Image (cartoon, helix red, strand yellow):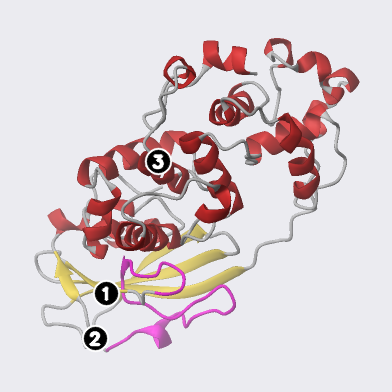
Amino acid sequence: MLAWYDRHARKLPWRIPPNQSKSGVRPDPYRVWLSEIMLQQTQVATVRDYYEKFLANWPSVGELAAADSEDVMKAWAGLGYYSRARNLKKCAGEVAANLGGRFPQTAGELRQLPGIGDYTAAAIAAIAFGEPVAVVDGNVERIITRRYRIATPLPAAKAEIRAVLAPLVPSERAGDFAQAMMDLGATLCSPRKPACSLCPVSQDCQAFRAGDAELFPRKAPKTEKPTRKGAVFVIRNRHDAVWLIKRPDSGLLGGMSALPGTDWTARQDGLTGEKSLPFEGAWQRAGSVRHTFTHFHLQLEVWEIQADTKPPFEGWWSAKGVLEAEALPTVMKKAIAAALPDAFRKQPS
């Protein structure tokens, strides 16, 4: 695996190349931590630009800790899973204030910090500090379940995978081994049509021998996601500035900028139709948008109105040229674009 990694390692902005790693160079723990938080449930291609923007704005954990929370949320907008951004800020504050600006060097200690779970703690400990711990992400789950033909469905198989992987982790170059496994899963041991003929360990892969690699990992049947409903209101003035509010700091999309709207959660629907409108006026239906969260789909009616006086709730006017920089989650950008198609240079997907 390490020999393959030395030849085929992906070039990523948060990594050091294997030739440097072999000579004892360690990556900056801050950069490793930042990238691993961003990569939680997010593709590498999406993370690159966000990572480089964060690093340009806040090159160290101390500078991120001192940053305005609103600026951090704005920089995160569009990356999704916004609790990560809130925990990112909390973790930076903890490291800067209580740990002298230095990250702990073991997975056990790293797990005590906000937003760092088992996988992230192991990844940081191995990559930044060389701790020989098992780093198990989706790529690694796929490799190990195929290599040993583990029939237990995920997520129940996680403990078995970790037990199998732990003794394979080398005492030297543990970080490179973790990244080699990630790269193998991302490039060759793919979910569909794996390139087994190019794999450096295919000769020992039980699923390859059996010809059924695509059947692994086994997964428990998915439950159908419910669809929640609600309404949002695009209130604009004569200059097409849009009235925004700030969502509560806790909960879904916590601390983000948003349109006013009805309440909705993962457990209940909000009001819809004319009975949902917050005040009287010449409201027009501007269509609807659909967005999928981890546990449910959301269907939002979009209503719009021109109102040149302030609406009867806390908020602020955001001019068309400023909307792009607001800490707006994708679902809110979709809703604004439904009423004002030219509000953003790039249409939210």
Answer above or below: position of 60 versus 167: below
Numbered label attached to residue 335: none
Amino acid found under the numbered disc labelled 2: Phe
Question: Which SS class for mark 3?
Answer: helix
Extent of the magenta region: 250-279
Nearer-the-camera pick, 80 or 228 = 80
Disc 1 target residue:
245
Disc 3 target residue:
29
Q: Is residue 197 visible?
A: yes
Nearer-the-camera pick, 151 or 227 = 151
Check the picture and name the quadrant holding the N terminus: top right
Q: Estimate the x, y position of residue 191 in percent, counting from the top left.
A: 69, 31
Amino acid found under the numbered disc labelled 3: Pro
Nearer to us of marks 3 and 2 is 3
Amino acid found under the numbered disc labelled 1: Ile
Q: Residue visible at 44% across and 63% down? A: 83
Q: Residue visible at 32% across and 61% down? A: 93
Label 3: how many Cα within 10 Å (few below 14, some 14–19, many 20+): many
Disc 2 target residue:
313
